[in-house]
Every structure is written in C-alpha cells, then in structure tokens.
Image (spheres, grey):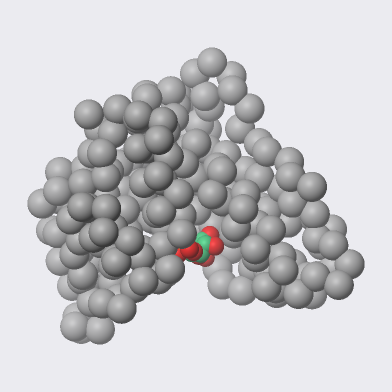
Amino acid sequence: MKRLVILISGRGSNMEAIVKAAQAEGWPAQVAAVISNRPDAAGLQFAARHGIATAVVDHKAFASREDFDAELARVIDGFAPDLVVLAGFMRILTPGFTARYARRMLNIHPSLLPAFTGLHTHERAISMGCKIAGVTVHFVTAELDHGAIVIQAAVPVLPGDDAKALSSRVLAAEHRIYPQSVRWFVEGALVWNGEVVSHRDGAAQHLFLS
Ligand code: GAR
C-alpha cells in the first residue's frame, strides 16, 4: 500500500475527489493524512469525517519560510508518505523543501502551464482573450508552477465567462485529472525520460472537455 499525504489550504475539493476515487476504485494506496496551513480549512472536516488523520501547521506561527517548511516536513514525514499531494496548498515552497520531495510531490495548477503561473489564472486568461483554458497536474520543483507535466485538461473559454464560470468549468476537469494522476503514481505507471514524465503504456496524458 502506498501512503499519501495531502496538503490543503481551503475547500479541499480536489483532496475530496482523490479520497473518493481511492476508495471507490480500490487503489493500492491510503490517504495517511491531510495537512493544512490554515486551521479553518473546510477540507479538514471532510478528512476527519472519513477517518483520515489531520494536522495543522499554521504558517502564521513561523518567522520565516524556512522555519515553516522545516516544521511542515517534520509533520509530513511523521506519516511516512510515498507521495505528497498539493491540493490547493497556497504556499510558496523553499528549494530545500521541494528537493526533499523531488519526484514524489505533485501539484495541481489551474492553467495550461507554462502559461499563467501564479495567482488569478482565470481572470488573466479571460482578460487576455484566451479561447482555451485548463489545468495541469505536475511534479513540483523549486520553480513555482513548473516541473514535469503528468496530465493537462483543456476547456473552452466561452463568451461572457467571468472568473467564477471559468473556474467551475476548470474545476470539473481538475476532479478528473488529479485522481487519475495520483492513481498512475501509486500504480507505478509513470516513467521518467530526462525531465519528462509519460505513462508506461502510453495512456493519454491530455483531456479535452467542451
Ligand atoms: C484549485 O482550483 C486548484 O487548482 C488551485 O486552488 C484550487 C483549490 O481548490 N490551486 C492553485 O491555484 C495552486 N497554485 P480545492 O481546495 O477545492 O481543491
């Protein structure tokens, strides 16, 4: 059984999608813990209701990013994860932290990377007049919102969309590709070729939703 630790900062709907898929599909994996940097993250309640261990490492209690990341790593490592899953975890991570979990930490970012790293992706895509938007699951490196891409999903930007409408269309895609990506990892189906990741059997690493 592979052990997963999922990091959240808020709602936790991606975490929820992963927990549900792991249970429903009988993955060879268990969610060992859900950890939040915010004590009031709604997702913590879902995790607790499902019998998953929860922990809070409040970034406000630390003087520096290094101190916060050191404590976060200590708590994560207490659950001995094979994979760390960032699911709406809204912290910039130090290079020491990302190196510690190299090739065993995934993130989901609501854009078609490398476009629109950082915040406010949907607003920026709309204001640029993009006709296609989407979401990326990728391995985490020291560079923000970079790293080997596991799956990307594309959705249309429709006339009249505001950020809310676009984000809910993208979120539906998130809930499909994040569980799929994590499943591939726990099944050992991802192979590295240099800095690129592929599915062992050539399964499609893209999804188009209309
Ligand atoms: C998701 O849309 C995720 O892609 C985004 O935060 C949201 C979290 O929702 N992540 C980032 O912006 C990371 N840079 P959730 O808490 O319901 O999963």
Q: Report the quarter where the N terminus lies.
A: top left
108 sits left or right of 136 in the view: left
Residue 159, horizontal then vertical, whole percent: 89, 67
Q: Which residue is pictured at 80% across the width and 60% down the height?
A: 157
Q: Quadrant of residue 168?
A: bottom right
Q: Is residue 2 above or below residue 89?
A: above
Q: Residue furthest top?
A: 201
Depth check: give the residue in front, 200 or 96.
200
Q: Which residue is pictured at 41% across the width and 31% down the height?
A: 25
91 sits left or right of 31 in the view: right
Q: Which residue is pictured at 19% across the width and 83% down the height?
A: 61
Residue 64, horizontal then vertical, whole percent: 24, 79
How many numbered badges does the structure rendering display?
A: 0
Q: Is residue 64 above or below residue 69?
A: below
Residue 53, horizontal then vertical, whole percent: 18, 56
**Residue 12 appears in the figure:** yes
Depth check: give the residue in front, 210 or 117.
210
**Residue 143 appears in the figure:** no
76 sits left or right of 50 in the view: left
Residue 169, horizontal then vertical, whole percent: 69, 58
Q: Quadrant of residue 82?
A: top left
Q: Which residue is pictured at 15% across the width and 43% down the height?
A: 80
Q: Is residue 145 above or below residue 203?
A: below
